[in-house]
Image: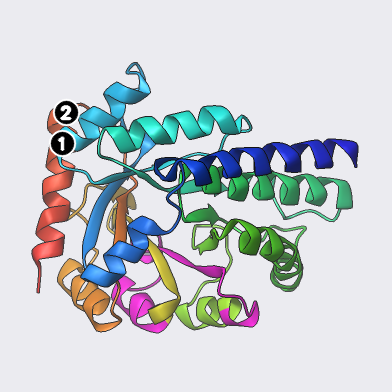
Amino acid sequence: MKDKIIKRRSFLKLTAAAAVAPSMLTASIPSARAQEEKKLYKALVIGMLPRALSDAEKFRLAKKCGFDGIEAGPMKDHKAAAEQAKIAREEGTPIHSLLYGWWPPFTNRDPKVVGKSIEAMENALRCARVMGADAVLLVPTRVTEDFSYQDAYKWSQEYIHKLVPTAEQTRVIVAIENVWNKFLLSPIEFARYVDELKSRWVKAYFDVGNVIIYGHAHHWIRTLGKRLVKIHLKDFKRSGYQWKNLLDGDVNWPQVRKALDEVGYSGWMTAELGGGDEAYLTDVAKRIDRIIAMK
């Protein structure tokens, strides 16, 4: 209990300092601006940038290559996180979301393990607040031979309900993503799953490439509609079962672009691909430009 009080005080101290200096805390501003301007912004996950570079060099390169923002990862040290976010803003590529993922997993019957998972995600939400990001990506669970679909569905919703108070406090969205976890295998189920959580702080983070092996991305976008808060960009080739660069796989990008317009999506489109050098990253940014330009 004492540790939790200390952590909470540290978090409040950081957010209070950020309130004094508005540039330190800009949660929701990028997405709010995108909605107002009805604009799509280009981002990439931080892991795509060369690891040998400093943060400033990474973000400077991202901007040079044509990106507007970054998706980063949560840190336990919120002072370090705030400093990284400050550098990103100074270089013109704000950190718009954090990728928590699914570790520790919610797929467990041990309350101690689940407790650690909830605590880690709560930290990610607080970290996002300090960094000025407005969402944290969460893969809620996975189905295994020993963990049934029914249990995964019921228990993961119970765990996410426990995250809502922290999401409300931080004003950071819990963004549920579809991955290859044998869970949420249709757009109708994904939409229902989000709706049943009954919170404005729980929305859908849709990965375009992840559904190509068993569906069509534009159908998912039209079904998820206003539930969408973020988009991940990948491409996949069914023949040969392999990941491809954007526009080189089986994603129907003209239909994806049309569907995004139909549901009124504005905001961040984040490339989640393998990393590379300046020439490669510039090419990825140009490919996103081509997707955005499709009508």
Q: Position of residue 128 (x, y in %)?
A: 53, 47
Q: Which of the two discs, 1 and 2, sits closer to the camera?
A: 1
Q: Nearer the viewer, residue 68 or 216?
A: 68
Q: Residue at 21%, 29% (x, y): give it.
A: 61
Q: Is residue 141 visible?
A: no
Q: Position of residue 127 (x, y in %)?
A: 57, 42
Reading the image, the residue beneath label 1 is 65
Q: Three-letter amino acid code at disc 1?
A: Cys
Q: Nearer the viewer, residue 45 or 162?
A: 162
Identity of the residue furthest to the front in this view: 20
Q: Position of residue 200 (x, y in %)?
A: 55, 74
How packed is label 1: few (under 14 Cα within 10 Å), some, or many (20 or more)? some
Q: Which residues are magenta?
A: 195-223
Which mark is first along the chain, 2 or 1? 1
Q: Is residue 101 visible?
A: yes
**In the image, which disc is placed on residue 278?**
2
| Quarter of the rendering containing residue 158 | bottom right
Q: Position of residue 102 (x, y in %)?
A: 61, 49
**Residues at badges 1 and 2 in contact (C-beta under 8 Å)?**
yes
Q: Three-letter amino acid code at disc 2?
A: Glu
* Image coloring type: rainbow
| SS for callout 2 | helix
Q: Is residue 213 magenta?
A: yes
Looking at the image, is 196 positioned above or below residue 167?
A: below
Left or right: 164, with 19 as reference point: right
